[in-house]
Image (cartoon, rainbow, N blue to C red):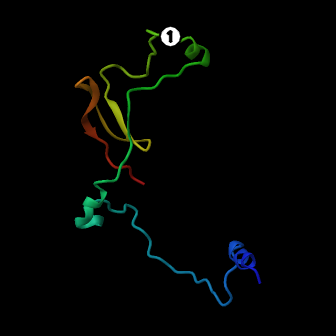
Amino acid sequence: MSKSNDHSSKDQGNKPQGAEAQLVELAPLPATAPFGPAVLGNNMSLLDSVEVKLSVVVGEARSTVGELMGLKEASVLKIDRHADYPVDVMLNGAVIARGQLVVVDDNFGVRITDIAAPAQP
């Protein structure tokens, strides 16, 4: 018997002889599973080095391709928010906070003014 024949039965999802699958019942998860210290306890520091990508949405605009092709330097693209409205701070497409745009050392920043409430399932 060649090695390729040995692997082909495994690759096809065949189970070894005598193997039986058994259904296991698990306790249902609560509707609102806790997060944070209740779950991680003293291990919250495990999350300190996890990188996430935040986006700040100033506003949106709808335009035709023809209008976009006509943009040039000094063109103004009107967005759907008033200048005084807060910007959205988003994580994976979900709004997690709102704030005001500020300038810090010639860079834009966001002063958080409101933390969004957790979404209810």
Name the one closer to the observer, 110 or 16: 16
Q: Position of residue 80 (x, y in %)?
A: 43, 22
Quadrant that contains the C terminus: bottom left
Residue lying furthest front: 2
**Is the residue marked by circle 1 packed among few (<14), some (14-19), or many (20+) residues within 10 Å?**
few
Name the one closer to the observer, 29 or 88: 88
- Residue type at mark 1: give it: Lys
Please determine whether, in this image, residue 55 is positioned above or below residue 44.
above
Quarter assignment of residue 47: bottom left
Please determine whether, in this image, residue 64 is positioned above or below residue 92.
above
The residue to which callout 1 is attached is 72
Quadrant that contains the N terminus: bottom right
Q: Position of residue 54 (x, y in %)?
A: 37, 40
Residue lying furthest bottom: 18
Q: How many numbered discs?
A: 1
Please state if 4 lies on the left or on the right of 76 as rendered.
right
Please state if 47 lies on the left or on the right of 120 as rendered.
left
Q: Position of residue 104 (x, y in %)?
A: 23, 27
| Label 1 secondary element | loop
Name the one closer to the observer, 59 or 105: 105
> Which residue is drawn at the image coordinates 67% and 85% (left, top)?
16
Please determine whether, in this image, residue 84 is positioned above or below residue 95.
above
Quarter assignment of residue 99: top left
> Which residue is drawn at the image coordinates 39% and 66% (left, top)?
30
Quarter assignment of residue 101: top left
> Which residue is drawn at the image coordinates 68% and 76% (left, top)?
10
Residue lying furthest right: 1
Please determine whether, in this image, residue 56 is positioned above or below residue 91.
above
Please state if 18 lies on the left or on the right of 95 as rendered.
right
Q: Position of residue 89 (x, y in %)?
A: 35, 37
Please state if 70 lies on the left or on the right of 75 as rendered.
right
